[in-house]
Image (cartoon, rainbow, N blue to C red):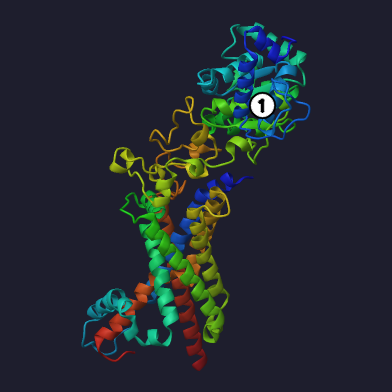
């Protein structure tokens, strides 16, 4: 066995299977959530639920991230807010505006887009990795975080951390040969793809569900059940 | 087959001592040796004890003065003769001269003048005469499917011929990607069951010189080393000489600074392409390809694909035909689900969810009615 063969497997059949498991798993999760249905309004709402959901999204995406210090959650735990925010920012920029990743999207979706220069993406990747380490240390040292962290939470960290670190090392050609790091990157990505639907990393979809439900609750201005 | 040493043969052809030493330097370069320990007892032309820096050349000079020619049997199977072609048109005529004249090619299907049974007989005679001494060069993949009927020469299958020739060989050199890893004949769906030589012959040393074609200077370098030292170069996991396949194209690429700066050509005629930016986005396989193209280059050091504006195809790596599209960025997956398959996966997920959901509802109802019955 050689690394070229491992790479071929990780970029080929394994990726295909992992992506299909991811798609089917997420479809299952989303369908299950939708089938839970909305709670019935026992009192006719005075406000608009749609409006409430829309405002909730706009505030959550366009306003709060830029003035976080007015929020209580930020005042109580700025580390998790800042590190978490930077981690997500770095992750999204790398995944969507990184050249290599855009080429993956292009091959999957059939169209591509302009990307950011490598040095910018690279710095954000480094920021995301550092943020992830900060979050890990925080989870490790904070007694409350320790209490609410089971093995799935630690695995979440591991499965997200591995692709990020191997990807970074690969871009910089550190320590190992390129195809070795590329293989490890793809293997860890594939494992993560399979892991996402059965873990809380699925919040990348369900965040929007909970935001919508909370927003609707705020907007309807009537008694909640 | 002359019994003279290589040097005396060269002398007969009118080569001066000075020319001979230059030639030895060329051979040293071909082997990509830059330094060897000084050899005791060796003196240079003036009779002075050899200093360290002349060690390599003098060692080669001594070897060529004492060694006889090296018999080579060259077999072609599922190939295009492109490797032979590249070798004969190499820009280093002295090196080709070394291989074709000073190393005796006893049998070569493309270059040989004779044809038919006579050639086959000559080959068998050479194999007998030099049993255990000759180098077997293989060009092209061997076919194993359906008793090897897809590639036969003189009524014998490629597999049979390879085993027969390999039995008496001192070493085997598989030149080109086909002989090394199966190459083009092995591309999906591999209709002939093509195999690389080192997958078939396990009991003899096999040196792979992959490439499409193999770089002539690499080929001659390996043969020169065997001729001079009687040894084979150190090999990597894929049986490739480490001195030629030790670094990735990417690491020696003249466009590498643009990769590091994140400057890419996005099409073959955009501003980036004109400025010579990195070809990674156009499908360059440089980062995972190990060969000497970026250093030795082609056509006498004139250029190589990336220099002339074409992304590396990865032709010195196994299965390079099926390793993703040639013009697709290397990060793109090799195989991906089609739209239909993805839709089927979504449908399967939803169907299972519906099934589980309904089962839950039914279970709850049953539990509910059971509770009611109990209450009653």
Choose top left, top right, bottom left or bottom right for residue B361.
bottom left
In this rendering, does residue A139 appear at all?
yes
Quarter of the figure that contains the N terminus of chain B: top right
Q: Secondary structure at mark 1?
A: helix
Residue B205 is drawn in which quadrant? top right
Q: Nearer the viewer, residue A15 or B312?
A: B312
Check the image and report above or below for B344 versus B105: below
In this rendering, the answer to whether B125 lies above or below A146 is above
User: Residue beneath label 1, please?
Assistant: B57
Q: Position of residue A50 (x, y in %)?
A: 24, 77
Q: Residue B168: x, y in percent? A: 75, 21
Relative to B47, B277 lies left or right: left
Considering depth in this image, is A82 or B188 the residue closer to the camera? A82
Given residues B143 and B240, the one toward you in this image is B240
Binning the other alpha carbons within 10 Å of mark 1 as few (below 14), some (14 to 19) or many (20 upward) gives many
The residue at the far bottom in this view is: B375
- The chain letter for the residue carrying disc 1 is B
- Identify the residue shown where x is 44% and y is 79%: A80
Q: Residue at x 77, y 18 (%)?
A: B131
Whether residue B154 is visible, yes or no, is no
User: Image height check: is B337 above or below A213?
Assistant: above
Q: Position of residue A8 (x, y in %)?
A: 53, 46
Q: Is residue B317 left or right of residue A65?
A: right
Residue occupying image coordinates x 35% and y 73%: A208
């Amino acid at each position: 066995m050689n690394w070229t063969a491992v790479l071929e497997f990780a970029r080929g059949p394994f990726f295909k299977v992992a992506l299909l498991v991811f798609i089917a798993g997420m479809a299952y999760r989303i369908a299950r959530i939708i089938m839970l249905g909305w709670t019935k309004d026992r009192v006719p709402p005075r406000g608009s639920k749609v409006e409430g959901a829309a405002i909730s999204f706009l505030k959550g995406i366009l306003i709060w991230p830029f003035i976080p210090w007015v929020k209580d959650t930020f005042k109580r735990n700025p580390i998790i807010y800042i590190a978490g925010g930077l981690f997500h920012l770095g992750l999204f920029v790398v995944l969507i505006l990184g050249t290599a990743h855009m080429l993956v999207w292009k091959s999957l979706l059939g169209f591509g887009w302009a990307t950011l220069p490598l040095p910018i993406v690279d710095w954000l990747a480094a920021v995301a990795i550092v943020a992830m380490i900060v979050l890990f240390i925080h989870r490790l040292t904070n007694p409350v975080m320790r209490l609410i962290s089971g093995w799935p939470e630690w695995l979440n960290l591991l499965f997200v951390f591995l692709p990020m670190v191997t990807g970074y090392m690969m871009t910089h050609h550190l320590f190992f040969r390129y195809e070795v790091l590329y293989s490890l990157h793809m293997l860890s990505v594939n494992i993560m793809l399979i892991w996402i639907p059965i873990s809380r990393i699925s919040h990348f979809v369900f965040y929007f569900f909970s935001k919508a439900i909370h927003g609707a609750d705020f907007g309807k201005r009537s008694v909640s059940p | 087959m002359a019994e003279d040493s290589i040097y005396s043969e060269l002398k007969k052809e009118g080569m001066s001592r000075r020319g001979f030493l230059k030639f030895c330097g060329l051979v040293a370069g071909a082997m990509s040796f830059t330094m060897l320990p000084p050899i005791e007892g060796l003196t240079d032309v003036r009779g002075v004890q050899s200093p360290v820096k002349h060690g390599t050349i003098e060692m080669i000079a001594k070897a060529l003065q004492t060694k006889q020619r090296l018999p080579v049997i060259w077999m072609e199977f599922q190939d295009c003769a492109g490797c032979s072609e590249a070798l004969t048109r190499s820009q280093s005529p002295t090196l080709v001269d070394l291989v074709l004249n000073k190393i005796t090619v006893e049998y070569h299907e493309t270059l040989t003048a004779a044809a038919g049974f006579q050639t086959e007989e000559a080959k068998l005679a050479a194999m007998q005469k030099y049993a255990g001494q000759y180098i077997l060069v293989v060009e092209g993949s061997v076919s194993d499917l359906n008793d090897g009927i897809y590639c036969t020469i003189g009524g014998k299958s490629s597999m049979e011929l390879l085993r027969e020739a390999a039995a008496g060989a001192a070493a085997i050199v598989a030149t080109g990607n086909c002989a090394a890893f199966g190459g083009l004949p092995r591309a999906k769906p591999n209709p002939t069951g093509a195999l690389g030589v080192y997958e078939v012959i396990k009991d003899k040393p096999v040196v792979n010189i992959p490439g499409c074609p193999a770089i002539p200077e690499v080929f001659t370098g390996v043969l020169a080393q065997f001729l001079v030292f009687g040894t084979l170069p150190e090999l990597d996991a894929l049986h490739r000489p480490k001195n030629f396949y030790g670094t990735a194209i990417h690491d020696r690429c003249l466009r590498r600074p643009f990769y590091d700066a994140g400057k890419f050509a996005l099409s073959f005629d955009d501003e980036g392409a004109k400025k010579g930016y990195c070809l990674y986005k156009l499908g360059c396989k440089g980062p995972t390809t190990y060969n000497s193209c970026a250093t030795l280059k082609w056509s006498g050091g004139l250029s190589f694909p990336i220099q002339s504006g074409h992304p590396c195809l990865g032709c010195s790596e196994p299965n390079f035909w099926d390793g993703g599209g040639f013009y697709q960025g290397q990060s793109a997956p090799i195989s991906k689900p089609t739209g239909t398959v993805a839709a089927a996966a979504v449908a399967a997920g939803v169907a299972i969810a519906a099934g589980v959901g309904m089962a839950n509802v039914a279970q709850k109802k049953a539990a509910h009615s059971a509770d009611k019955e109990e209450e009653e």
